[in-house]
């Protein structure tokens, strides 16, 4: 969803997700599911108007899953400074992750002649909402 507020909407913003039947209030940013620490979601949220009931009912979603904004959370100087910091940290994390991925390419080191055999195979490691 494109909007004038940027990628990260303020805490307290109430949205409807694409295909959703119940609105969600944004409660946090850059969250990971307990069962998959390799995927980071843009937002965490709770059902609106019920609020946070249990950790099992936390919604994790990305900005492009937002269909409509019903209410924008508080935007003040503190929120603006936080958003600048958040955008910088996310950009840094993505850059570091990309660098780690490109640097983690498998390196094939030839075995010494004394241990090489015919038919030698190299071993390589292979590198996804709710």
Image: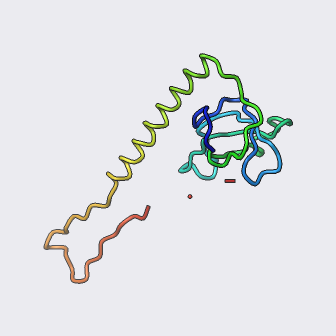
Percent x, y of residue 119:
25, 83
- How many numbered marks appear? 0
Percent x, y of residue 107:
27, 61
Q: Is residue 120 left or right of residue 47?
A: left
Colouring mode (rainbow / by chain / secondary structure / one colour): rainbow
Please tell me in which quadrant of the rendered image residue 74 appears.
top right
Q: Nearer the viewer, residue 128 or 65?
A: 65
Q: Nearer the viewer, residue 67 or 113?
A: 67
Percent x, y of residue 70:
77, 36
Q: Is residue 16 above or below residue 71?
A: below
Q: Nearer the viewer, residue 40 or 19?
A: 19
Q: Residue at x 63, y 44 (%)?
A: 1
Pick out the residue farthest to the right.
Answer: 50
Q: Is residue 96 above or below residue 110?
A: above
Q: Residue at x 42, y 64 (%)?
A: 126
Q: Residue at x 58, y 39 (%)?
A: 30
Q: Is residue 83 left or right of residue 58?
A: left
Pick out the residue farthest to the top.
Answer: 77
Pick out the residue farthest to the bottom.
Answer: 118
Q: Residue at x 19, y 75 (%)?
A: 116
Percent x, y of residue 25:
75, 36
Q: Is residue 9 above or below residue 118?
A: above
């Amino acid at each position: 969803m494109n909007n004038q507020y940027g990628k990260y909407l303020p805490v307290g913003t109430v949205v409807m997700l694409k295909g959703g039947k119940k609105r969600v209030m944004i409660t946090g940013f850059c969250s990971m599911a307990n069962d998959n620490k390799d995927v980071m979601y843009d937002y965490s949220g709770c059902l609106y108007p019920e609020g946070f009931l249990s950790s099992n009912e936390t919604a994790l979603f990305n900005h492009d899953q937002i269909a409509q904004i019903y209410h924008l959370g508080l935007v003040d100087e503190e929120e603006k400074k936080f958003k600048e910091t958040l955008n910088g940290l996310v950009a840094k994390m993505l850059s570091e992750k990309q660098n780690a991925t490109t640097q983690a390419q498998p390196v094939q080191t030839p075995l010494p002649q004394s241990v090489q055999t015919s038919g030698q195979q190299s071993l390589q490691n292979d590198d996804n909402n709710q």
